[in-house]
Image (cartoon, grey):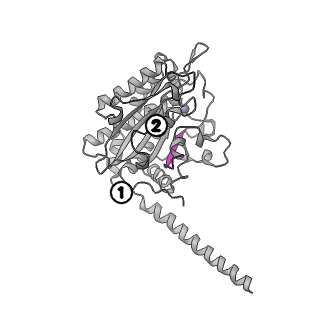
Amino acid sequence: MKILVVASLLLLMGTCSNKRHSEKVSDLKESISFDNKSNVETYLNTITEAELKEHLYEIASDKYAGRMSGEDGHNEICNYLRAHYDSLGIKAPNKYSNYFQTVPKSYLPEELNQSQNVIAFIEGEVFPDEYLIVSAHSDHMGVIDGKVYNGADDNGSGTSALLEIAEAFKIAEKNGAKPKRSIVFLHVTAEEHGLYGSRYYIDNPAFPLEKTVANLNTDMIGRIDKRHADNPDYVYLIGSDRISTELDFIVRKANDEFTHLELDYKYNAYNDSNRYYSRSDHYNFALQDIPVIFFFNGEHEDYHKATDTVDKIHFESLRKRTQLIFATAWYVANAENAPTKEVL
Ligand SMILES: [Zn+2]
Protein backbone atom coordinates (compact mmCIF):
# COMPACT_ATOMS: atom_id res chain seq x y z
CA MET A 1 0.00 0.00 0.00
CA LYS A 2 2.74 2.38 1.00
CA ILE A 3 4.64 1.50 -2.12
CA LEU A 4 1.56 2.08 -4.19
CA VAL A 5 1.11 5.59 -2.68
CA VAL A 6 4.70 6.50 -3.47
CA ALA A 7 4.32 5.13 -6.98
CA SER A 8 1.18 7.13 -7.70
CA LEU A 9 2.75 10.22 -6.17
CA LEU A 10 5.70 9.83 -8.51
CA LEU A 11 3.32 9.36 -11.41
CA LEU A 12 1.52 12.56 -10.44
CA MET A 13 4.76 14.50 -10.13
CA GLY A 14 5.88 13.14 -13.49
CA THR A 15 2.71 14.31 -15.15
CA CYS A 16 2.99 17.76 -13.59
CA SER A 17 6.57 18.30 -14.65
CA ASN A 18 5.76 16.99 -18.14
CA LYS A 19 3.01 19.51 -18.43
CA ARG A 20 5.25 22.27 -17.19
CA HIS A 21 7.82 21.20 -19.76
CA SER A 22 5.44 21.25 -22.70
CA GLU A 23 4.06 24.59 -21.56
CA LYS A 24 7.58 25.97 -21.34
CA VAL A 25 8.29 24.75 -24.85
CA SER A 26 5.15 26.27 -26.32
CA ASP A 27 5.66 29.54 -24.38
CA LEU A 28 9.18 29.79 -25.73
CA LYS A 29 8.01 29.04 -29.27
CA GLU A 30 5.30 31.66 -29.08
CA SER A 31 7.69 34.27 -27.69
CA ILE A 32 9.68 34.23 -30.93
CA SER A 33 8.30 36.54 -33.58
CA PHE A 34 9.79 38.89 -36.14
CA ASP A 35 8.62 42.45 -35.43
CA ASN A 36 9.08 43.97 -38.81
CA LYS A 37 8.88 41.23 -41.39
CA SER A 38 8.88 43.49 -44.42
CA ASN A 39 12.03 45.20 -43.18
CA VAL A 40 13.82 41.87 -42.85
CA GLU A 41 12.58 40.86 -46.28
CA THR A 42 13.87 44.06 -47.84
CA TYR A 43 17.43 43.48 -46.63
CA LEU A 44 17.32 39.73 -47.13
CA ASN A 45 16.55 40.44 -50.79
CA THR A 46 19.80 42.37 -51.17
CA ILE A 47 21.48 38.95 -50.97
CA THR A 48 21.47 37.92 -54.61
CA GLU A 49 22.75 35.03 -56.67
CA ALA A 50 24.58 37.48 -58.94
CA GLU A 51 26.62 38.92 -56.06
CA LEU A 52 27.28 35.54 -54.47
CA LYS A 53 28.49 34.40 -57.88
CA GLU A 54 30.77 37.36 -58.27
CA HIS A 55 32.43 36.67 -54.91
CA LEU A 56 32.63 32.93 -55.29
CA TYR A 57 34.05 32.99 -58.83
CA GLU A 58 36.77 35.26 -57.49
CA ILE A 59 37.48 33.34 -54.28
CA ALA A 60 37.56 29.92 -55.98
CA SER A 61 39.70 31.03 -58.91
CA ASP A 62 43.11 29.52 -59.62
CA LYS A 63 44.93 32.73 -58.81
CA TYR A 64 44.49 32.10 -55.07
CA ALA A 65 46.19 28.70 -55.47
CA GLY A 66 43.80 26.80 -53.21
CA ARG A 67 44.09 29.30 -50.32
CA MET A 68 46.57 27.36 -48.22
CA SER A 69 46.97 29.07 -44.81
CA GLY A 70 50.12 31.14 -44.64
CA GLU A 71 50.78 31.03 -48.39
CA ASP A 72 50.50 33.95 -50.83
CA GLY A 73 47.14 32.85 -52.24
CA HIS A 74 45.51 32.78 -48.83
CA ASN A 75 47.09 36.08 -47.80
CA GLU A 76 45.69 37.60 -50.99
CA ILE A 77 42.21 36.30 -50.32
CA CYS A 78 42.43 37.83 -46.83
CA ASN A 79 43.26 41.12 -48.55
CA TYR A 80 40.21 40.66 -50.78
CA LEU A 81 38.01 40.13 -47.71
CA ARG A 82 39.23 43.16 -45.81
CA ALA A 83 38.96 45.34 -48.93
CA HIS A 84 35.29 44.32 -49.09
CA TYR A 85 34.66 45.42 -45.48
CA ASP A 86 36.69 48.55 -45.89
CA SER A 87 34.83 49.58 -49.06
CA LEU A 88 31.48 49.06 -47.32
CA GLY A 89 32.55 51.12 -44.31
CA ILE A 90 32.32 48.11 -41.98
CA LYS A 91 34.86 48.70 -39.23
CA ALA A 92 37.77 46.66 -37.91
CA PRO A 93 37.94 46.03 -34.14
CA ASN A 94 40.17 48.47 -32.19
CA LYS A 95 42.50 45.64 -31.24
CA TYR A 96 43.04 44.65 -34.87
CA SER A 97 42.66 47.93 -36.65
CA ASN A 98 43.80 46.57 -40.04
CA TYR A 99 41.18 43.77 -39.87
CA PHE A 100 43.93 41.14 -39.49
CA GLN A 101 44.38 39.10 -36.34
CA THR A 102 47.78 37.51 -36.84
CA VAL A 103 48.01 33.86 -35.88
CA PRO A 104 51.70 33.32 -35.17
CA LYS A 105 53.65 30.45 -36.64
CA SER A 106 54.34 29.11 -33.14
CA TYR A 107 50.60 28.52 -32.65
CA LEU A 108 50.23 26.52 -35.86
CA PRO A 109 51.34 23.06 -37.04
CA GLU A 110 54.96 23.01 -38.17
CA GLU A 111 54.19 22.94 -41.89
CA LEU A 112 52.25 26.22 -41.79
CA ASN A 113 53.53 29.77 -41.95
CA GLN A 114 52.12 32.65 -39.93
CA SER A 115 48.59 33.45 -41.05
CA GLN A 116 45.60 35.59 -40.05
CA ASN A 117 41.93 35.70 -39.19
CA VAL A 118 40.00 38.58 -40.76
CA ILE A 119 37.63 40.40 -38.39
CA ALA A 120 35.11 43.17 -39.13
CA PHE A 121 32.04 44.31 -37.21
CA ILE A 122 28.96 46.50 -37.19
CA GLU A 123 28.40 48.10 -33.82
CA GLY A 124 25.06 47.58 -32.11
CA GLU A 125 22.91 50.54 -31.22
CA VAL A 126 21.30 49.37 -27.97
CA PHE A 127 23.63 46.64 -26.70
CA PRO A 128 26.95 47.50 -28.37
CA ASP A 129 28.83 45.35 -25.85
CA GLU A 130 27.00 42.18 -26.82
CA TYR A 131 28.27 40.30 -29.86
CA LEU A 132 26.88 37.88 -32.38
CA ILE A 133 29.63 36.17 -34.38
CA VAL A 134 29.01 34.99 -37.92
CA SER A 135 31.95 32.89 -39.08
CA ALA A 136 33.41 30.96 -41.99
CA HIS A 137 36.88 29.58 -42.63
CA SER A 138 38.75 31.19 -45.50
CA ASP A 139 41.51 28.63 -46.05
CA HIS A 140 41.60 25.45 -48.10
CA MET A 141 44.08 22.80 -49.16
CA GLY A 142 46.40 24.61 -51.58
CA VAL A 143 48.06 22.87 -54.51
CA ILE A 144 48.64 19.11 -54.33
CA ASP A 145 50.50 17.20 -57.07
CA GLY A 146 50.24 20.22 -59.33
CA LYS A 147 46.46 20.44 -58.95
CA VAL A 148 44.80 23.52 -57.49
CA TYR A 149 42.25 22.68 -54.82
CA ASN A 150 39.84 25.57 -55.35
CA GLY A 151 37.51 24.67 -52.49
CA ALA A 152 34.52 26.38 -54.08
CA ASP A 153 32.11 24.73 -51.68
CA ASP A 154 34.72 24.25 -48.91
CA ASN A 155 34.58 27.04 -48.00
CA GLY A 156 34.30 29.59 -50.77
CA SER A 157 30.54 29.19 -50.32
CA GLY A 158 30.51 30.17 -46.63
CA THR A 159 33.05 32.93 -47.24
CA SER A 160 30.89 34.49 -49.97
CA ALA A 161 27.82 34.14 -47.75
CA LEU A 162 29.50 36.17 -44.98
CA LEU A 163 30.36 38.98 -47.40
CA GLU A 164 26.75 39.18 -48.56
CA ILE A 165 25.31 38.99 -45.03
CA ALA A 166 27.62 41.80 -43.93
CA GLU A 167 26.58 43.94 -46.87
CA ALA A 168 22.88 43.38 -46.14
CA PHE A 169 23.34 44.49 -42.51
CA LYS A 170 25.31 47.51 -43.67
CA ILE A 171 22.58 48.57 -46.11
CA ALA A 172 20.05 48.19 -43.28
CA GLU A 173 22.22 50.33 -41.02
CA LYS A 174 22.45 53.05 -43.66
CA ASN A 175 18.66 53.06 -43.90
CA GLY A 176 18.36 53.57 -40.16
CA ALA A 177 17.91 49.91 -39.15
CA LYS A 178 21.07 49.53 -37.11
CA PRO A 179 21.22 46.21 -35.22
CA LYS A 180 20.68 46.33 -31.46
CA ARG A 181 23.66 44.07 -30.81
CA SER A 182 27.05 44.18 -32.47
CA ILE A 183 27.57 41.73 -35.33
CA VAL A 184 31.07 40.36 -35.90
CA PHE A 185 32.15 38.87 -39.23
CA LEU A 186 34.94 36.43 -38.56
CA HIS A 187 36.90 34.69 -41.33
CA VAL A 188 39.14 32.15 -39.64
CA THR A 189 42.30 30.56 -40.99
CA ALA A 190 43.79 27.06 -40.76
CA GLU A 191 40.48 25.26 -40.29
CA GLU A 192 41.59 22.51 -42.62
CA HIS A 193 44.55 21.72 -40.36
CA GLY A 194 42.42 21.37 -37.23
CA LEU A 195 40.33 24.47 -36.42
CA TYR A 196 43.40 26.53 -35.47
CA GLY A 197 42.15 29.98 -36.44
CA SER A 198 38.95 29.72 -34.42
CA ARG A 199 40.84 28.30 -31.45
CA TYR A 200 43.26 31.20 -31.66
CA TYR A 201 40.31 33.59 -31.66
CA ILE A 202 38.94 31.90 -28.52
CA ASP A 203 42.35 32.26 -26.85
CA ASN A 204 42.64 35.87 -28.03
CA PRO A 205 39.09 37.17 -28.47
CA ALA A 206 38.65 40.53 -30.18
CA PHE A 207 35.48 40.94 -28.08
CA PRO A 208 34.74 39.39 -24.66
CA LEU A 209 33.58 35.79 -24.94
CA GLU A 210 31.26 36.21 -21.95
CA LYS A 211 29.45 38.86 -23.98
CA THR A 212 29.34 36.74 -27.13
CA VAL A 213 25.71 35.66 -27.42
CA ALA A 214 25.94 33.15 -30.29
CA ASN A 215 28.02 31.88 -33.20
CA LEU A 216 26.50 31.11 -36.59
CA ASN A 217 29.07 29.14 -38.59
CA THR A 218 28.94 28.34 -42.27
CA ASP A 219 31.16 25.69 -43.81
CA MET A 220 30.03 24.23 -47.17
CA ILE A 221 26.61 25.59 -48.10
CA GLY A 222 26.78 25.64 -51.92
CA ARG A 223 26.14 22.05 -53.01
CA ILE A 224 23.42 19.43 -52.99
CA ASP A 225 24.16 16.01 -51.49
CA LYS A 226 22.80 12.65 -52.67
CA ARG A 227 20.22 12.48 -49.90
CA HIS A 228 18.56 15.63 -51.29
CA ALA A 229 19.06 15.07 -55.01
CA ASP A 230 15.31 15.59 -55.48
CA ASN A 231 15.00 18.62 -53.22
CA PRO A 232 17.78 21.21 -53.31
CA ASP A 233 15.86 23.41 -50.85
CA TYR A 234 17.42 22.05 -47.69
CA VAL A 235 20.18 22.67 -45.20
CA TYR A 236 21.59 20.60 -42.38
CA LEU A 237 21.52 22.26 -38.98
CA ILE A 238 24.01 20.97 -36.47
CA GLY A 239 24.27 21.96 -32.83
CA SER A 240 21.41 24.47 -32.87
CA ASP A 241 19.55 22.87 -29.94
CA ARG A 242 22.47 21.71 -27.85
CA ILE A 243 23.15 24.79 -25.74
CA SER A 244 20.06 26.92 -26.32
CA THR A 245 16.66 25.55 -27.32
CA GLU A 246 15.72 29.15 -27.99
CA LEU A 247 18.37 29.50 -30.70
CA ASP A 248 17.01 26.39 -32.41
CA PHE A 249 13.48 27.82 -32.29
CA ILE A 250 14.80 31.10 -33.71
CA VAL A 251 16.33 29.48 -36.79
CA ARG A 252 13.15 27.45 -37.33
CA LYS A 253 11.04 30.57 -37.08
CA ALA A 254 13.33 32.45 -39.47
CA ASN A 255 12.96 29.58 -41.91
CA ASP A 256 9.16 29.42 -41.53
CA GLU A 257 8.86 33.14 -42.15
CA PHE A 258 11.33 33.67 -44.96
CA THR A 259 13.14 30.76 -46.59
CA HIS A 260 11.02 27.58 -46.32
CA LEU A 261 13.92 25.16 -46.58
CA GLU A 262 13.82 21.60 -45.33
CA LEU A 263 15.81 21.76 -42.08
CA ASP A 264 17.58 18.44 -41.83
CA TYR A 265 18.76 17.40 -38.35
CA LYS A 266 20.24 14.05 -39.41
CA TYR A 267 23.79 15.03 -38.53
CA ASN A 268 22.75 16.67 -35.29
CA ALA A 269 22.16 13.28 -33.69
CA TYR A 270 24.49 12.69 -30.74
CA ASN A 271 25.39 9.24 -32.03
CA ASP A 272 26.03 10.33 -35.63
CA SER A 273 29.27 8.65 -36.68
CA ASN A 274 30.40 11.60 -38.84
CA ARG A 275 30.70 13.76 -35.71
CA TYR A 276 30.29 16.97 -37.73
CA TYR A 277 29.44 18.84 -34.53
CA SER A 278 33.11 18.79 -33.61
CA ARG A 279 34.48 19.20 -37.13
CA SER A 280 34.16 22.88 -37.92
CA ASP A 281 34.89 26.17 -36.20
CA HIS A 282 31.64 26.59 -34.26
CA TYR A 283 32.86 23.75 -32.03
CA ASN A 284 35.46 25.98 -30.40
CA PHE A 285 32.65 28.40 -29.47
CA ALA A 286 30.42 25.58 -28.23
CA LEU A 287 33.23 24.46 -25.93
CA GLN A 288 32.95 27.91 -24.31
CA ASP A 289 29.22 27.34 -23.76
CA ILE A 290 28.31 29.82 -26.48
CA PRO A 291 25.17 28.77 -28.41
CA VAL A 292 26.08 27.79 -31.99
CA ILE A 293 24.55 26.75 -35.27
CA PHE A 294 26.56 25.00 -37.95
CA PHE A 295 24.98 25.42 -41.42
CA PHE A 296 26.10 22.67 -43.79
CA ASN A 297 25.11 21.04 -47.09
CA GLY A 298 26.52 17.57 -46.37
CA GLU A 299 29.36 15.84 -48.15
CA HIS A 300 29.59 15.15 -51.87
CA GLU A 301 31.92 13.32 -54.24
CA ASP A 302 34.15 16.41 -54.67
CA TYR A 303 34.72 16.93 -50.95
CA HIS A 304 38.44 17.63 -50.34
CA LYS A 305 39.24 16.99 -53.99
CA ALA A 306 40.59 19.22 -56.76
CA THR A 307 37.15 18.86 -58.38
CA ASP A 308 35.40 21.06 -55.76
CA THR A 309 35.02 23.79 -58.39
CA VAL A 310 32.72 26.77 -58.76
CA ASP A 311 30.82 25.47 -61.82
CA LYS A 312 29.26 22.82 -59.55
CA ILE A 313 27.81 25.32 -57.07
CA HIS A 314 24.02 25.46 -56.84
CA PHE A 315 23.64 29.21 -56.49
CA GLU A 316 19.94 29.25 -55.77
CA SER A 317 20.46 27.00 -52.75
CA LEU A 318 23.47 29.04 -51.69
CA ARG A 319 21.35 32.18 -51.80
CA LYS A 320 18.48 30.68 -49.79
CA ARG A 321 20.81 29.28 -47.14
CA THR A 322 22.62 32.61 -46.91
CA GLN A 323 19.26 34.34 -46.48
CA LEU A 324 18.32 31.93 -43.70
CA ILE A 325 21.56 32.74 -41.87
CA PHE A 326 20.89 36.45 -42.37
CA ALA A 327 17.33 36.21 -40.99
CA THR A 328 18.54 34.19 -38.00
CA ALA A 329 21.32 36.70 -37.37
CA TRP A 330 18.81 39.54 -37.68
CA TYR A 331 16.64 38.04 -34.98
CA VAL A 332 19.51 37.31 -32.60
CA ALA A 333 20.99 40.77 -33.12
CA ASN A 334 17.68 42.58 -32.60
CA ALA A 335 15.84 40.58 -29.93
CA GLU A 336 15.30 42.13 -26.49
CA ASN A 337 17.24 39.27 -24.92
CA ALA A 338 20.13 37.14 -26.08
CA PRO A 339 19.25 33.44 -26.61
CA THR A 340 18.87 31.79 -23.22
CA LYS A 341 21.40 29.10 -22.46
CA GLU A 342 18.84 26.49 -21.49
CA VAL A 343 17.98 23.21 -23.12
CA LEU A 344 14.30 22.31 -22.78
ZN1 LIG B 1 35.55 23.45 -44.57
Q: Identify the residue at image location x=42%, y=42%.
A: 133
Position of 230 with respect to 6 (left or right) is left
Q: Residue beneath label 2, please? A: 201
Classify 23 as above or below 256.
below
Q: Locate residue 103, reporting x and y percent.
A: 46, 29
Q: How many marks?
A: 2
Q: Locate residue 233, reporting x and y percent.
A: 52, 41
> Furthest residue to the front?
106
Q: Helix or strand or loop: what does disc 2 sit on?
A: helix
**To which quarter of the image does residue 55 belong?**
top left
Q: Locate residue 64, reporting x and y percent.
A: 47, 18
CA distance for labels 1 and 2: 27 Å
- Front: mark 1 or 2: 2
Magenta-span inclusion, residue 290: yes
Examine the rendering and report whether any part of residue 46 can be seen: no
Region rendered in magenta: 287-296
Q: Is mark 1 within 8 Å of ligand 1?
A: no
The numbered disc on residue 336 is: 1
Q: Nearer the viewer, residue 93 or 76?
A: 93
Which residue type does callout 2 highlight? Tyr
The numbered disc on residue 115 is: none
Q: Identify the residue at image location x=43%, y=46%.
A: 209
Which residue type does callout 1 highlight? Glu
**To which quarter of the image does residue 143 belong?**
top right
Classify 123 as above or below 144.
below
Q: Helix or strand or loop: what does disc 1 sit on?
A: loop
Q: Quadrant location of ligand 1?
A: top right
> Furthest residue to the top?
146
